Image: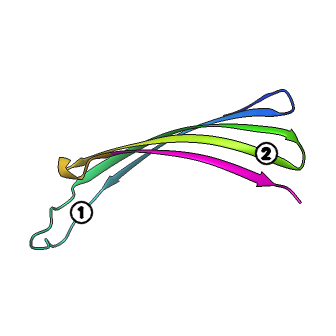
Amino acid sequence: AHYALGEAITFDANAGFIRNDYKQSFSIPGEVARINETTKQVGLAATFAPRKLYDVTLSVSQVFRNANPSVLNYDSTKVGLTLAVHI
């Protein structure tokens, strides 16, 4: 989703969902076999462009992974600050 608040400020939002089912024909000794996993991602970004020459973007995203076995679960947060100069 994209929303413009005037000419200088824009907001973006996104979401994603991935499901993987693994079928392993053989096992690897010492490694945990994965059966399935789901990954959900959400993200938000705000861009400030006071002039056409440059813009600044702040973005935040969160990833949630649920796997079977649960030892492979994780949550991850990413934050980015970007300065873009348009030549």
Mark 1 or 2, nearer chain start: 1
Q: Residues within 10 Å of mark 2 (few under 14, many from 20)?
A: some
14, above or below 71, in the image: above
Residue at 64%, 41% in the rendered image? 58
Q: Amino acid at mark 1?
A: Lys
Left or right: 66 as drawn, with respect to 1: left
Where does the image place residue 71, in percent across and percent down from the top left? Answer: 18, 51
Q: Is residue 69 visible?
A: no
Where does the image place residue 31, in percent across and percent down from the top left? Answer: 14, 67
23, above or below 13, in the image: below
Residue stretch rendered in magenta on the structure: 75-87
Q: Which mark is residue 23?
A: 1
- 70 part of magenta stretch: no
Depth check, front residue: 32 or 82? 82
Depth check, front residue: 45 or 38? 45
- 78 part of magenta stretch: yes
Where does the image place residue 72, in percent across and percent down from the top left? Answer: 24, 52
Q: Check disc 2 and report the residue beneath it.
A: 55
Depth check, front residue: 61 or 1? 61
Residue at 69%, 43% in the rendered image? 57
Residue at 84%, 33% in the rendered image? 8
39, above or below 6, in the image: below
Q: Amino acid at mark 2?
A: Asp
Image quarter of the N terminus: top right
Q: Residues within 10 Å of mark 1 (few under 14, many from 20)?
A: few
Total count of labels: 2
Kindly indicate whether the residue at mark 2 contacts the one at mark 1 (C-beta within 8 angstroms): no
Q: Nearer the viewer, mark 1 or mark 2?
A: 2
